Image (tube, grey):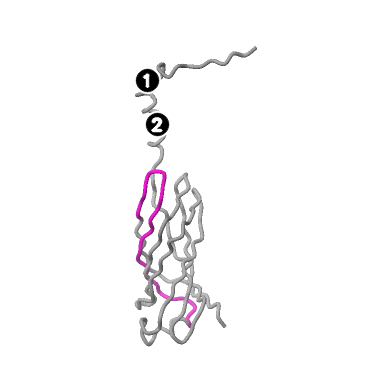
Amino acid sequence: MLRQRTFPLSRFPFPVLLCLSCATLGRLAFTEPDVSLQEIAVTGIGLTGGTFDLVFDVFNPNDYRIRSTRLEVGVDLEGTHFGDALLDRPLDLSPTNHNRVVVPVRFEWAGVGAGAKALLTRRAVGYGITGRVLLDTPLGDKTVALTGKGNVPLLKLLK
């Protein structure tokens, strides 16, 4: 017959328990995710404006899941401010993995200037993005700044 052996809590002093939990937390470190704009997909064009999707690749380098609670981003195309986007639905970012994040943007022709329509006929456009992502991590809430510029393919879904 096997006997279950129990150890009274008093045999493990509080400082030992505290050190064990500190050692576990010490191994957790937060590294900001890498965010890059992969493409811009035009989803609608009308007389007053249109819509497009910003398609981001987000790499979470951490060994734990991160949940975004809010993403705010402003988009410039070829030096012209096209619009601002807000994504306030939660996104789960898998540990040590790439995640595809699609952010819809709505714009009005009146706000982007006369030559802006021509931008949407190109295969690629120069972009600039600024914004921030609010993240919920095991180490607490973190804010990550988004900035970037470069050229990105423009996918025309409307024919």
Viewer-nearest residue: 123 or 94: 94
Using a 10 Å C-alpha cutoff, classify the residue at mark 1 as few (fewer than 14 neighbours), some (14 to 19) or many (20 or more): few
Viewer-nearest residue: 46 or 114: 46
Viewer-nearest residue: 147 or 74: 74
Report whether 156 appears left or right of 73: right
What whole-number distance in Å separates the C-alpha atoms at marks 2 and 1?
A: 13 Å
Q: Earlier in the sequence, mark 2 or mark 1?
A: 1
Query: What residue is shown with label 2?
Result: 21
**Residue located at (46% from left, 66% from top):** 103
Which picture quadrant has residue 111?
A: bottom left
Tell me, yes or no, whether the highlighted magenta stretch contains residue 136: yes
Q: Is residue 73 above or below residue 8?
A: below
Viewer-nearest residue: 88 or 153: 88
As shown in the figure, which amino acid type bears the numbered disc 1? Answer: Pro
Query: What residue is shown with label 1?
Result: 13
| Residue 127: x %, y % from top left | 39, 72
What segment is highlighted magenta in the picture? 121-143
SS of the residue under disc 2: helix
| Residue 65: x %, y % from top left | 48, 48
Q: Is residue 136 above or below residue 4?
A: below
What type of secondary structure mainly makes up the magenta span?
A: strand
Asked if labels 1 and 2 touch by Cβ distance under 8 angstroms, the answer is: no
| Residue 53: x %, y % from top left | 48, 71
Tell me, yes or no, whether the highlighted magenta stretch contains residue 122: yes
For this orientation, the residue located farthest to the right is 1
Q: Is residue 22 above or below residue 65?
A: above
**Residue located at (53% from left, 78% from top):** 156
Q: Count of labels shown?
A: 2
As shown in the figure, which amino acid type bears the numbered disc 2? Answer: Ser
**Residue located at (44% from left, 62% from top):** 36
Considering the image in quadrants, where does the C terminus appear?
Answer: bottom right
